Image: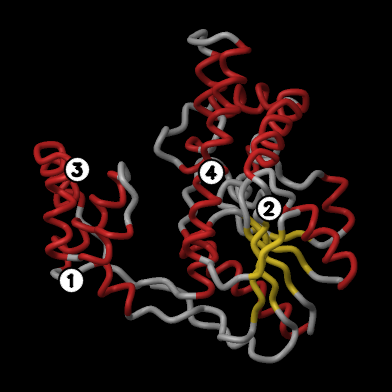
Amino acid sequence: MPPASLDLSQPPLVTLIAGPTASGKSALALKMARETDAVIINADSQQLYADLRVLTARPSVEEETLADHRLYGVADAAEAWSVGRWSRAALALLDDLQAETRPAILVGGTGLYFTALTRGLADIPPVPQAVREAVEADYAIQGEPAFRARLAGIDADAAGAIEQGDRQRLVRAMSVHAASGRSLSEWKAQTRPLLAPGAWAGLVIEPDRSRLYDNCDRRVDLMMEQGALDEVRVLAARGLSPTLPAMKAVGVRELADHLRGATTRDEAVGALKQATRNYAKRQLTWFRNQTPDWSRVEN
């Protein structure tokens, strides 16, 4: 079930800072936190994992001493944190901070985390594995155009909102209807925000795309200098399931391919830069579409 809504209609104000990777979110959050004595709360699904400090560009140990940082590196890579679990942890922190009258800054690039806070989580019942497998088989047989058209007859809003090529979300929407008899959009329509309206201010960092891509490339170079390859080597040695969120972090597959001899180091770095730019582009698109009423900063 989704966590209960937290009434933050009284001060302190909660600030949400969102944006793509390598856009300067963490630096801005740190600056604001030092000026206001705010607590910085992680809203990035990959920075939760202790195993991925370098590859996810988590705040450094030095930066963490300059302001109070929470929910960074709190999970082991063998765990699978959901948006619901993160929301419960974040709201518990916000509840404590409200009692202390301390402001909070939630910063990250995971759009669903911000959606949960500002729009709510749908209490959708779990989809049985057999149902999902059957829907997956239908998709494989029908192909995306026919499958999407079929979904549109059941859930037009979902079919229209899901991007081309997003097989996972198309199958998810169809599976929810098959399992529950109700469309995914119906379930979502019954949600309520976890933060009270008017209790928060949202800010999206939206850099010029060419500058953002340059930042992405420089970040990858810095990651390699800081030991990203060793970080992935240690993670790969654990033999964890590739379906775990930490194993799906940008860069894990690219660098693991190099470590097993499938690519050269230069090829791996090139692939990681491309994957990082692609990820940043998807984040830019998501925040433009989903947070049109938030303030914008080019940074």
Nearer the observer: mark 2 or 4; the answer is 4
Circle 2 — which element? Answer: loop
Q: Which mark is residue 257?
A: none
CA distance separating discs 4 and 3: 23 Å
Circle 3 — which element? Answer: helix
The mark nearer the N terminus, 3 or 1, is 3
- Picture quarter containing residue 160? bottom left
**Picture coordinates of residue 79 (x, y %)?**
50, 47
Q: Is residue 215 above or below residue 270?
A: below
Q: 262 or 279: nearer the eye?
A: 279
CA distance separating discs 1 and 2: 36 Å
Nearer the observer: mark 1 or 2; the answer is 1
**Picture coordinates of residue 165 (x, y %)?**
30, 41
Residue type at mark 1? Arg
The mark nearer the N terminus, 4 or 3, is 3
Q: Which mark is residue 72?
A: 2
The mark nearer the N terminus, 1 or 2, is 2
Residue type at mark 4? Lys
Residue placed under numbered mark 1 in the picture: 182
Residue placed under numbered mark 4 in the picture: 281
Residue placed under numbered mark 3 in the picture: 144
CA distance separating discs 3 and 1: 21 Å
Residue at the spot x=48%, y=81% of the render?
Answer: 4
Circle 1 — which element? Answer: loop
Q: Residues within 10 Å of mark 4 (few under 14, many from 20)?
A: some
Q: Is residue 287 left or right of residue 161?
A: right
Residue at the spot x=20%, y=68% of the render?
Answer: 183
- Picture quarter containing residue 234? top right
Q: 224 or 131: nearer the eye?
A: 224
Residue type at mark 2? Tyr
Circle 4 — which element? Answer: helix
